[in-house]
Image (cartoon, rainbow, N blue to C red):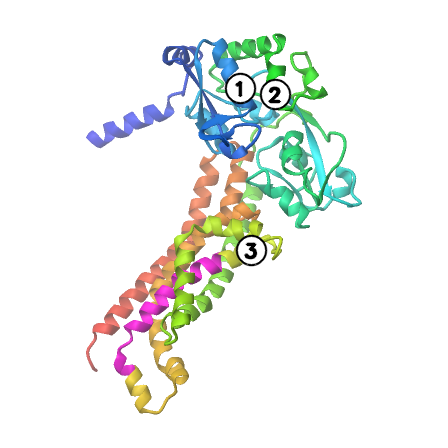
Amino acid sequence: MLSALVLAAATTVSSAPAGSASDTLDGVRHRGALTFGADVQGGEPYVFEDPKDPAKLVGFEVDIAQGLARRLGVTARINQADWSNLVPALERGDFDVVMNGLEDTPARRTRILVSTPYFVFGETLAVRRGARERTLGDLRGARIGTLNQSFAYDLLRERGYQPVIYEGVSEPYTDLELGRSGAVLLDHIIAARYGCNRPGVECLPGDVARGAYVIGIRRSDGRLKSVIDEAIAKMVEGGELRSILERWRIWDPRQEALGRTGTPSTTLPLAEAPRAFGAAEARLFLEGAAVTIGLSIAAFALALPIGLSLALARLARARRYRWIASAYVELFRGTPLLLQLYVLYFALAPVVKLGPITAAILGLALNYGAYEAEIHRGALLAVPKGQTEAARALGLTRFQTLEHVLLPQSFRIALPSMTNDFVALLKDSSLVSVITVVELTKRMTIASVDLRSWLVPGILCAALYFAMSYPLARLAQRLERKLHRDQHSGPP
């Protein structure tokens, strides 16, 4: 009975709206603060940590937020959230509004209310310096980098291109400069700071399209939208908005349209209704699962010899081999896999230029090779010493003893742990999406945007991971039980 009441209460809370047409604005005034959702990772000049005082956030959007809050008689408070999840976090009530380079698109208007624009941007096309391509039309079939859930992403999809999705604003231009992509399409404010100043990148003149940055508000908060629109209008009329943009050196002729009727909000067609999950989406999920399996098998096949070599080195007589192997194991076990992928794909790119799939396989293999090393080392040490002594008595060399006596027995001991490691690698392969590989988890995030729901894509993604990992987990359990029986069985 008690559990039923708890479940009913949880359901009631989760289904309640984050705010109604009256209570959010009243709540803002009651607590004296308007909370803005933003992602500090977006960098300068949006919202970022002050180089002189990292505990303080600065940026042109911080200044605008403070100006808006002041007109509402409250203070501004910035809440950190991942940029791709700003809208879902707003909908669930994590903050009052969103303001972080949020572009006005038809798809967003179907989910949230948007304020009047506070900044007009142009989409800048960047190519490699000296490239023959001069327009977007010249780039049919090319890899064009952009950010997920951005105006540029929607524009490329609408015009029939297949964009390459990145998580950060600098990485697309790194890949372009290295020749791993054909172009980058992003807002001019991003291009000017992270792309156009690179020696190997050329930003083409003119805007591919124009749009506007807006403040995102929950659909139930019409009163809050009205007062925010009024505050933006006063900032435009009083010149405060222009003063902020000039201070951050981002005022240009595009901004003359602010405050006028017809301020560019979008050049994209009206948003279609959210797609239903059908056979096409299911096929894409299966393709993502195939990429995940392929990456995992290839990476683990490489991790095994790496791990075995390291294990043997750690058991070698020569001290230098033991030291090198130990340093490798501690380094790769002591640092995050995500960081290792970034270093391998982006930081080392000027020296070793790897493709996304190659970098993904190598990164996973190098990381899991360290874990395999410890599994194999433990298994080798578990083989009774009498086996080695018997081999020497028979006149076998060290290599022959290893090949014919130790390794077959240690491999049998290590097999259950190796199977568990493969399951872990299968799930960790989701991290390779940061280097533009579209595997199962990335496919799920893309589908959730297209379908405007995380429920069905999330359930299917979890089901596919379970279908791939559960048989392996069961296999590991069977191997462990069989090994346990064999070790404790007496002579026939």
Are circles 3 and 2 on residues that touch, CB within 8 Å? no
Farthest residue to the front: give it. 52
Image mark for residue 134: none
Residue type pointed to by label 3: Ala
The quarter of the picture where residue 487 lies is: bottom left
Q: Which residue is mark 2?
A: 247
Residue 204 as seen in the image, left or right of residue 115: right
Residue type pointed to by label 2: Arg
Q: Which residue is mark 1?
A: 63
Question: Up-down: is 183 above or below 467?
Answer: above
Question: Up-down: is 310 above or below 360?
Answer: below
Q: Which residue is mark 3?
A: 359
- Looking at the image, tell me whether mark 3 or mark 2 is earlier in sequence order: 2
Which residue lies at the image location 21% right of the left edge and 75% below the top edge?
Answer: 489
Visible residue check, residue 164: no
Residue type pointed to by label 1: Asp
Q: Nearer the viewer, residue 53 or 293?
A: 53
Q: Magenta span covers which residues?
A: 364-387
Residue 259 as seen in the image, left or right of residue 363: right
Residue 113 belongs to magenta span: no
Are circles 2 and 1 on residues that touch, CB within 8 Å? yes
Which corner quadrant holds the N terminus? top left
Which corner quadrant holds the C terminus? bottom left
Q: Residue 184: x and y, percent?
A: 67, 40
Question: Up-down: is 239 above or below 350?
Answer: above
